[in-house]
Image (cartoon, grey):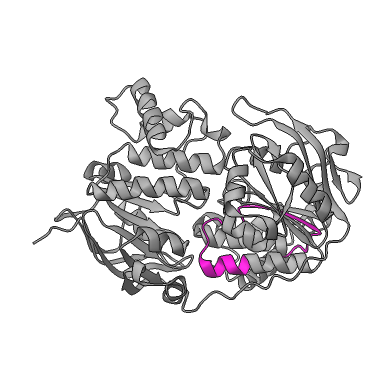
Amino acid sequence: MTIQRLQLAHITKRYPAVVANSDVSLTVAPGETHAVLGENGAGKSTLMKIIYGSVKPDDGVLTFDGQVVSPRNPQQARALGISMVFQHFSLFDTLTVAENVWLGLDKSLALAEVTHRITAKASEYGLDIDPSRPVHTLSVGEMQRVEIIRALLTDPKLLILDEPTSVLTPQAVQKLFVVLKKLASEGCSILYISHKLHEIRELCTACTVLRGGKVTGVCNPQNESNESLSRLMIGAEPPPLTHRPVHAGAVALRVKGLTLAREDQFGVDLEGISLDVRAGEVVGIAGVSGNGQKELLYALSGEDTRAQAPMIEVFGKAAAHFRPRKRRALGLHFVPEERLGRGAVPTLSLAHNMLLTRSNAVGKGGWIRTGALQQHAGEIIRRFNVKAGGPGAAARSLSGGNLQKFIVGREIDANPKIFVVSQPTWGVDVGAAALIRGEILALRDAGCAVLVVSEELDELFEISDRLHVIAKGRLSPSIDRAAATVPQIGEWMSGLWNAPQAAAKEVAHA
């Protein structure tokens, strides 16, 4: 009789506002890549945290390599051979990459040896990262690489991956899949959470579906279609997007020769970036994480006001020196890539998080209009189908996908004239992604100028009218989405664009 790598029997976890897992059972064999599929808030991440020892179940039994275990913390889980890559990163901002990785490894290893192992592992798997960089200087995609490398360095028997490709480019995803298939062939079991159904079908040989914290199906995803997996997960297929022909109006947001020196030694210099975003169009920016996206978004949002005033124009006004509040007053709203910490204050309620972008919620004398905030947050929760314990729920209590829906919904609900959004569907399920993308297109059709920065090419091709690529702090000319191809955009991500040819296309478009 074959001993299973992992067996969960009747796992239940209750919280005051919700039952996250209810009588969940699943089995993972040695060398098996097993998907856990479900919409946002279905209980996937809670279940993984129970396996990893960071959450204690109320009921149920966990068996690992034939032994009943009850890891009380991640350190004990790692000692068993269980490693996890979280969707929300567990990294210390003030420490370097090497120091963060060192914390999860055998302390008998010297930091210099850990640094060497990181470099070797990064080179082996194509996950480029500098071990000496402080984590606070990394982009989200680079933080993802650190988490993956840290997990791989523990030589796990069971590797848990929670949305590991949400901020990776297609090329990086394929490299990761090579790594994962090699690990599985060597006997490592993998629990894989992703909302990208084509990834699950390519990589996984078994799948457990959760809905509302309960197991609602088990299948081999390689025998399923994207449509059938969607029905298993959300009970229906996501609605098709309606993408009407673009009728672009006047320029709403203009960037002219934006040149900015990096603010820290690990940042990226912006060099002569120019782009126009017109009313009634969606402009997409593709690129490998860490190529200047963060610096560009800081300049556009008003968090970085060092640029010369004329380099950024909002409806013809030189706005580079304007702070975020003044830009919002002109109609520019912004969704950052980091949900917790910049998009939302983790400890505040959803209602009070409305204060981040709603100055009209403060009445005369500086009193906060709490009732109005509660009502408004409740409307966003309903409109965007956010699963939360109401407007009073703390931001950190939501699943990643549900918090993303709330933050995007908060800014869309403000009826922006210019909407700048980074990674709009990071970590959300197929139904929620379709909802967010549909709302973005509805904004566009209502005359809003939309700029989307994303590392998901499928997303950009689905919603953009024109595309740019950012590489090493430079921006390619734009190309009509209909004329662009995935291989071409992938080539441009290396900075290899034919400027004269692309510029001619842009002139023809104008």
Residue 153: image location, x then y, percent: 32, 36
Q: Is residue 24 positioned above or below 186 on the image? A: below
Q: Nearer the viewer, residue 53 or 182?
A: 182
Q: Nearer the viewer, residue 302 or 450?
A: 450
Q: Nearer the viewer, residue 318 or 468?
A: 468
Residue 311: image location, x then y, percent: 84, 38
Q: Residue at x 53, y 61 (%)?
A: 428
Q: Is residue 107 positioned above or below 252 on the image? A: above
Q: Quadrant of residue 281?
A: bottom right
Q: Is residue 417 magenta?
A: yes
Q: Is residue 441 magenta?
A: no
Q: Is residue 498 left or right of residue 186?
A: right
Q: What stretch of residues is rendered in magenta?
A: 413-436
Q: Residue at x 42, y 54 (%)?
A: 162
Q: Is residue 138 left or right of residue 448?
A: left
Q: Residue at x 46, y 70 (%)?
A: 226
Which quadrant is home to the C terminus? bottom right
Q: Quadrant of residue 291?
A: top right
Residue 130: image location, x then y, percent: 49, 28
Residue 506: image location, x then y, percent: 79, 50
